[in-house]
Image: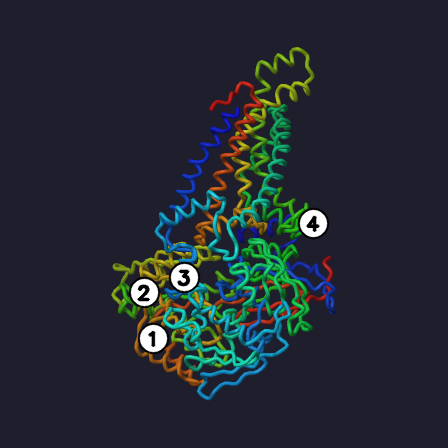
Amino acid sequence: MKRLLALAAMLLAACTGGNPDTPAPSSIQVGTTLAADQSMTRALLGMPRSLDPTLLTDVDAQDVVDDLFEGLTTIGSNDDFVPGVASSWEVSADGKTWVFHLRPEARWSNGDPVTAADFVYAWRREVDPKTGAEYAQALSPILNAAAIATGKAPVDSLGALAIDAHTLRVTLVSPTPYLLAVLADSYFQPVPRAAIERYGDSWSRPEHMVSNGPYVLSEVIVGDRITLNKNPMYWRAADVRVTRVTYYPLDEDVQLSRFMSGDVQFTSVFPASQFQWLKSQLGNQVMTSPYLGVQMLPFNMVDPPFAHNRDLRLAMTMALDRRILSDKLYQGVQLPAYCAVPPLPNYTQQLPVWASWSDEKRHAEARRLYAAAGYSAAHPLHVQLDYPSGGANVADFMDALAAMWRVNLGADVQPYQEEFRVLLQNLRLHKSSLFWNAWIGDFPDPFTFVQLAQKDFAQNFGQFNDPQYEALLAAAANEPDNAKRYTYFERAEDILNQEAVFVPMLYYATQHLIKPYIKGWHANLQDRMPTRYLYVLEHQVR
Amino acid sequence: MLRFLLNRLLTAIPTLLIIATLAFALLHATPGGPFDSAKRMPPAIQASIEAKYHLNEPLWRQYARYLGDLAHGDLGPSFQYRDTSVNELIRQGLPVDATIGFCALVVAMLLGGAVGVFAALRRNTTGDYVPMFFAALGISLPTFVIAPLLILVFAARLHWLPSGDWVYGSITHLLLPVAALALPYTAYIARMVRGAAIEVMTSPYIRTARAKGMPRRTVILRHALRPILTPLVSFLGPAFAGVLTGSIIIEQVFGLPGIGRYFVQGAINRDYTLVVGITVLYGALIIVFNLLADLCYAWLDPRVRLHS
């Protein structure tokens, strides 16, 4: 449909005498003072399955819940994590015990104070198997959380204790330098005990929900919109400018048409394949920035043809021209990836040596390795590449990969599209030799990426198992000094490169369309943009 | 008549039972479950969720439970939207589809009918070729082409109408989805009515009426219109059921909360109860509208008799 939209736009431009290559004059005049009406419209890629912070499973729900609830920490306006309900905290010398002091002015939307007991209740509810929280493992840094979630320990043994109404002690399994980042996640946000006990599952509906964030839930129409109003009880309500925000769940092409019509002012995505055209039409309304995610192709490390065949894996990894994939298929929005961990502050990415080689040199080496692995034009590699349906541009992307392997190596790779849930089942049964996977980091730390190859990690679909790699991750887990911890991850990532455990392809980028009169957006790695930082300038649509 | 009605309604029950059984069996046979996700959950949590939705029970018991609830009009909880029931989703989505669908079909009938008769009366002239050219175009152009074009022209470029969303009672929000949905139906009805009108207008009793000096207008309205509408009725029965259960393309492009979108999302997410519920609803609507079509048929054409 995106092609159709582009075509239709060009036809329309032709009919109305315009030229699609010429920047359209701006039809919006933006002033410098705040608009009297501080309501705004945003888009989501899908309808959230639940707005219960404990139960949510999707990125779209996270965006809305960021507006409704606030954890001990919260995402700041400079890609950092700042005090939320907690005003201050202390950490023990071994990094395993944290004491948080909650601000007394923090309130639920019904006026009740937010207390340490609310956090203990929320976290116990998250890990209690009876709740059925699909992502309960998010709390695994807390002592006994993993044991409780697997039914091996009682719920009250969780390492979270309310010392008094405004003091919370948290005991961790091991030093967790990224704790302040994860505490801002929805899984760590408090939930209102009284409402949950009274209304059960339906507590998260607008008529029952009590929240402690900058907004309260006003209306939910499944498949159409979610409306939030400013929460006057929020402790920093004076800093919140947008008084009403409406979220629309729309796919990316529809987000674009709604934006062009002015009905949505802030999209969650735009079609990357139209980036250059959008830039020419909308100029600075098109925003992109690095996003904490990577597209990759893991190899099945226990079955032929890739098991015990490092040369073949390396050949496959080196034969791809990532620059072409980035430029031609994503118009430079997603950037080439040569290693698993995306660029992160204070972390040195372990780029393989061939990443800087010329195409000719890299292809030649890939061909040498391919031959060394026992394959040739007479005896080419035949393998199926499994990928899920539904992604934008995905079939073209897979065809491009297959073409590169065919041209650069002579390998016969057959892309095969499966429904996501069917593919997932096949991956868990280890039926696939080569498959598409993508990973969005839960928090800005290399661990969230290197764990993908950890032996017991559920998403280690390729079943990589290396004692040296495990030892490095174990050492990192017990290391309170973050700089030293990062060196362990760097060494681990080096092993991933040497062993070619997966083919890193592209790093994701955030992709937003934002009206010129909506201000306050800032790029951040996790692509979380709470509405409380946004504001609407006076404007006139001509 | 009453016997006919009762008989048709009674035979609907086993039909719906077969539909529910097939939908239930096919969905459960599909690989992947409603709570599968990339992040694997601990077995204790998986077991807890399955127990909550009775997915841990033998399939026959799940089926019996579903049928028991269905008999009471309870379509169960949605697996996808955890604080919402399937009944609520249908209550929310059906009026949206019904409003848009009803308006679209009324527009299509009036416009398509008028154009069809107009063209038939000017057979093999420009007054026939031009409307039939546009009718062929309307049938050939899929909704997923028409709907974005309408948005581009009337919302993105001219800013006359909203590009989507659903606001109860707002005519402006209705116009574009109704136009997009009505266009292919209008074209189809125009061609159908033209064909029927040509056949009727050349039949002996019309010729007789005209030979007796009856004005053309009276001939058409009093004698020709009812037989012209007869084939339309058999088309409109399933068409009404179809538009009531949503046009996925229209809902997707205009971002409307209709049950067509729920159905597709439900199938992708293995929302068993939602998909079976909408399938049964669709079956029931088809049965009801086919029955209504048969009744209209008998009313329009005295030669048709209702037999049980």
Residue at mark 2 to residue at mark 3: CA–CA distance: 31 Å
- How many angstroms separate mark 1 from mark 3 (CA)? 42 Å
Mark 2 or mark 1, which is nearer to you?
Answer: 2
Badge 3: how crowded within 10 Å, few (<14), some, or many (20+)? Answer: some
Q: In this view, does A540 lie to the left or right of A328?
A: right
In the image, A159 versus B242, the foreground residue is A159
Whole-percent x and y of residue A197?
Answer: 53, 64
Please tell me which of labels 2 and 1 falls first in the chain: 2
Q: Which amino acid type is shown beneath numbered disc 4?
A: Trp
Q: Residue B160 carries which label?
A: 4
Q: Is residue A98 above or below residue A329?
A: below
User: Do the residues marked 3 and 4 share a common chain?
Assistant: yes
Q: Position of residue A403 (x, y in %)?
A: 38, 58
User: Can residue A402 be spotted in the picture?
Assistant: no
**Mark 4, mark 1: which one is toward the viewer?**
4
- Residue type highlighted by circle 3: Ser
User: Which residue was labeled with disc 2?
Assistant: A300
Disc 4 is placed on an element classified as loop
Task: Verify CB contact (< 8 Å) between mark 3 and mark 4.
Answer: no
Which numbered mark, 2 or 3, is in the foreground of this view?
3
Depth check: give the residue in front, A336 or A83. A83
- What's the amino acid at mark 2? Asn
- Can you tell which quarter of the image residue B195 is in? top right
Query: Dot 1 corresponds to which residue?
Result: A498
- Tell me if residue B208 can be seen: yes
Left or right of A416? Residue B243 is: right
Q: Mark 3 = which residue?
A: B48
Circle nearer the N terminus (3, 4): 3
Q: Is mark 1 on a helix, strand or loop?
A: helix
Same-chain check, marks 4 and 1: no
Disc 2 and disc 1 in contact, CB within 8 angstroms: no
